[in-house]
Amino acid sequence: RLRDAETTRRRLHNTIQELRGNVRVFARVRPFLPSDDDGDDDGLPKNSFVQTAADGLSLTLLNSAEDDDDDGPFAKARPREPQHFAFDRVFGPATGQDEIFREVGEFVQSALDGYQVCLFSYGQTGSGKTHTMQGSGRGAMRGIIPRALEQVATYLEEQRERGWEYAMHVTYVEIYNETVRDLLIPANASPETLKKAANLDVRRDAKTGRSAADGATYVPVDPADTQQVDELMTLAAKHRCVAATDMNAVSSRSHAVFTLHLEGVHRQKNARLRGALNLCDLAGSERLARSGAVGLRAKEAAHINKSLSALSGVFSALATKSRHVPYRDSKLTFLLMPALAGNGKTLLMINLSPTPASARESLSTLNFGQKVRKVELGRAAQHLETL
Ligand code: ADP
Ligand code: MG
């Protein structure tokens, strides 16, 4: 009976989501960290520059005019008046990882039901994107990726009892300077494999409409096997910093795309469904070029700007229902095209830092979130076919 209630709840969720459109934008403000500067040294508790409303649906970015001595070209971008923004959900600094996951878990479920799903974390470096997606450590601070796998493991059990058998695979790639790198190549791979893994093509399969990083290690995964999942994450983290002299710098300038590919088969119903869950930790959205970056930094800035502006371009085109949606403008948007196209489901989590020094970047993050909020995808479609 519990299970029937669960099925009904999921159907209801899918229906509600269809009615509201298939793009959700959530905002999360992280707490002050000991290392954060709050702009004064009065020793009083630090006040967040982004104040979340009790309704959990809106927030206010405070006025920074008082201490604004910046007359440079970006001065205008700074908030002069307190500005209000509404989102589908707003999470304040006290929100725990478990509560975040409760709100996004439905998207994970949709992937199991045969939808193409994409969750993004977007924001400036240090705003909490990786904390949201990957999390910190293995306990209560676990992020969306490990929790999603746990949830999938639970649902799999239930689906099995209903007659569905699932095959699950994981890919994990990083996009850095418009180059797609495999994060799951085995530690003992040959030099040729390593070389190939450092520059993958994104291909589109005309038959299934799916995009994939061609040649990315496709790891069969048992989501219930937490040890295997841990090992995959550790391997990915290792590869993520191999090429880097400054690991944090590279991870903040690259996009990490974790994908769980699901295929369910129901013999009696003669049915097959295919879903994908893309969990995407985006590069820092700050404008790196502003500080007059040169050399590699300038090149990185241009590439990040390229893919984030391509993402922005895709959302704009979708919002205005333009006939041409520029998915091919970046590796990122091309790879995620199936989830961003008409019948997918997208959740954008914008991450905000509470410090006054971040106000300008927060404003630009909030504006991006507002733009995405205007997007309505078509009716999401389950990918269901007969065997
Ligand atoms: P980003 O990936 O956007 O650069 P991180 O996720 O690495 O940012 O977060 C920066 C720092 O803030 C990390 O030390 C992280 O643990 C911490 N942090 C971020 N969000 C939270 C949060 N909600 N609660 C506690 N600490 C957080
Ligand atoms: Mg990060």
Image: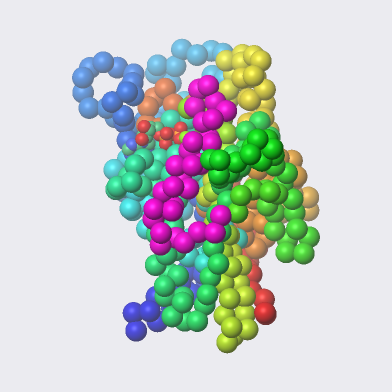
Q: Which residues are magenta?
A: 219-247
Rendering coords of residue 76 (x, y %):
55, 22
Residue at screen point 53% across, 36% down: 239
Q: Is residue 165 above or below residue 146?
A: below
> Does the magenta run of residues contain 231?
yes
Observer able to see residue 105 = no
Q: Quadrant of residue 309?
A: top right
**Percent from the top left, x then y, of residue 256?**
55, 41
State left or right for residue 297 relative to residue 241.
right
Residue at (67% x, 45% y) in the render: 333
Is residue 248 positioned above or below 87 on the image? above
Task: Please determine whether, in this image, residue 334 is positioned above or below residue 357.
Answer: below
| Residue 34 or residue 335, whichever sits in front | 335
Residue placed most toward the observer, 198 or 114? 198
Q: Quadrant of the C terminus?
A: bottom right
* Image x and y of residue 264, in percent: 57, 72
The image quadrant of residue 344 is: bottom right
Does the magenta portion include 280?
Answer: no
